[in-house]
């Protein structure tokens, strides 16, 4: 699959968060991103790994519960971030270049301000 760098949401994208926010800055290392330490600073490596987002179909079929947050179609991501449609139904928010972890979290927090709380998802058994 040819992965294209996107700087604007091509469709509505979704993330499970909590009642107060989408938790975009909840970074799990090394699952979400790879890091290295340079001069005592933790740096995120720009290798295509990033924070997970889902399409509408995928978020509806995922057996997880929590508050669903939406990044509306057409939303631009902050400079320094990009979207990658890395597999069907899934996007990642990744850095465009190697970036200090704290700076990456700051950019994700800026993007979180553009998110809209949609509904509370429950697992139906």
Image (cartoon, rainbow, N blue to C red):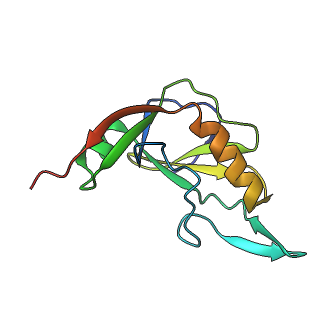
Q: Residue at x 55, y 23 (%)?
A: 74
Q: Residue furthest front?
A: 20
> Residue at position x 74%, y 58% from top?
102
> Looking at the image, which residue sits at the far left?
125
- Please indicate whether residue 4 sits to the left or right of residue 35 in the image: left
Quadrant of the image occupied by residue 45: bottom right
**Residue 33 against residue 116 in the figure, above or below:** below
Residue 20 screen position, x and y as percent: 46, 42
Place of residue 88 in the rendered image (x, y in percent of width and height, measured from the top left):
39, 48
Is 42 or 96 nearer to us in this picture?
42
Tally of numbered discs = 0
At 64% from the left and 52% from the top, the residue drawn is 94
Q: Is residue 39 above or below residue 88?
A: below
Front residue of 69/86: it is: 69
Provide residue 32's location: percent of width, then percent of height. Answer: 55, 64
Q: Is residue 8 left or right of residue 38?
A: left
Residue drawn at 66 percent across, 38 percent down: 110
Q: Quadrant of the C terminus?
A: bottom left
Can you give x and y, in whole percent of width and height, for residue 76 in the image? 63, 29
Displayed quadrant of residue 29: bottom right
Identity of the residue furthest to the top in this view = 74
Left or right, 63 with reference to 104: left
């Amino acid at each position: 699959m040819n992965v294209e760098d996107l700087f604007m949401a091509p469709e509505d994208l979704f993330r499970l968060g909590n009642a107060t926010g989408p938790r975009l800055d909840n970074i799990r290392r090394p699952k979400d991103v790879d890091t290295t330490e340079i001069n005592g600073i933790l740096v995120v490596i720009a290798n295509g790994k990033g924070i997970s987002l889902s399409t509408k179909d995928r978020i509806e079929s995922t057996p997880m519960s929590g508050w669903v947050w939406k990044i509306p179609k057409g939303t631009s991501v902050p400079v320094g971030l990009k979207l990658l449609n890395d597999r069907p139904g899934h996007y990642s928010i990744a850095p465009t270049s190697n970036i200090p972890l704290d700076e990456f979290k700051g950019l994700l927090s800026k993007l979180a301000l553009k998110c809209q709380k949609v509904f509370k998802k429950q697992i139906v058994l």
